[in-house]
Image: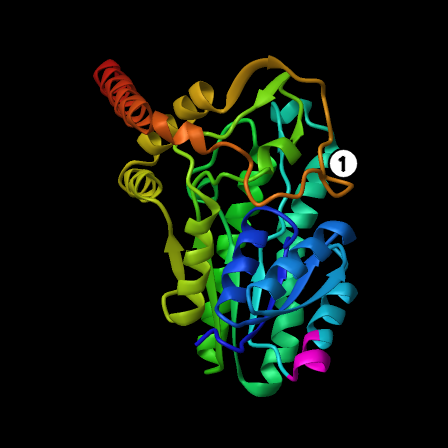
Amino acid sequence: MVRSDVVVITGASSGIGRTTARLLASRGSRLVLVARGRAALDEVANECRALGGQAQTHVADVTDPEAMLEVANEAVATFGRLDVWVNVAAVASYGRFAELPRGEVRRVLDVNVMGYANGCHAALRVMSRRGSGVIVNVASIVGKVAQPFSAPYAMSKAAVLALGVSLRSELALERKGIHVVSVVPPTIDTPFFEHAANHTEVELVALPPVYPPELVAHGILAAIRHPERGERTLGALGRGLVAIHRLSPRLGNGIMAVQTAWGQFGRAPAPSSAGNLFASGSPAEATGGWHGRRRRNVRVVLALASAAALVASAGRSRSRGR
């Protein structure tokens, strides 16, 4: 149960990946840490060793399928087996969809979709030899309730959720002892927004409410311990928004649109940037300094309620007009 498990983590140099590596190391896991930046990976590996875990590093881009298979084989060569693969690495590009560079749209999908597919493929190739293992894919609330101004990211996370469903069905039909779990977080306090490509002309800020990365790390730990539960949506307000969307997609989408317009963008101007899409980002920290925005939770709840009322009222008005 986690202790002594051999775990691969992609996107391990910052944010959720870095926090998860620390947590699993403190539980005695043996880790293979994957990211594009050598210096940050070495920092994380040293942190993990100090916490009692064993850690190896592998500099690679998740869009390279051969590199991911090499990582899986390295885990077996170093530690004797592969128990868990955690797909975390992800990128984003913000802006009006019609104005986003086509190359950036492709890159987001390559990293967030094909990167996860490459990781799953490599893990399955190795895990199938033993007939057991757990794959954890970190998705997002916006994969369930799509967000404006980040269409490529929303597309990619919806695809990650579909990948999880498809693989779970396939493995169940084949009666293999391999589990695939989708972890679905809300906004998390990481450097993600600083790293993202930005073509909105203003600074990106974390959309409140903002949760600490430990929420996702513990969600991943729970997924490893209890992989029979195929999907885990994290955060009370995140689960609430998904529930609203399930009952009324129009209402859920309206809430997300208003919430994004009110809370995703700052006041400071920002130059157009490709962020970390094509090169590793800096700083490679676990958190992004957004913890203070959690104090806005009450205002967020009021905003959600107001948005719900506005959208519902608009729906009623349209119905009367027909």
Q: Residue at x 44, y 63 (%)?
A: 221
The residue carrying pointer 1 sits among few (fewer than 14), some (14 to 19) or many (20 or more) residues within 10 Å by Cα, namely few
Q: With 1 as the anchor, is 70 left or right in this view?
A: right
Task: Locate the N terminus and report the quarter of the image it occupies.
Answer: bottom left
Q: Which secondary structure is most common in the magenta stretch?
A: helix
Query: Which corner quadrant of the image does residue 34 belong to?
Result: bottom right
Q: Residue at x 27, y 20 (%)?
A: 306
Q: What span is colored magenta in the figure?
A: 75-80
Farthest residue to the bottom: give it: 130
Residue 163 seen by the camera? no
Task: Specify the amino acid type for callout 1.
Answer: Gly
Q: Residue at x 48, y 47 (%)?
A: 213
Question: Camera-side residue: 161 or 81?
Answer: 81
Q: Which residue is tagged 1?
A: 103
Residue 101 seen by the camera? yes
In the depicted structure, whether residue 26 falls above or below residue 108: below
Question: Camera-side residue: 4 or 11?
Answer: 4
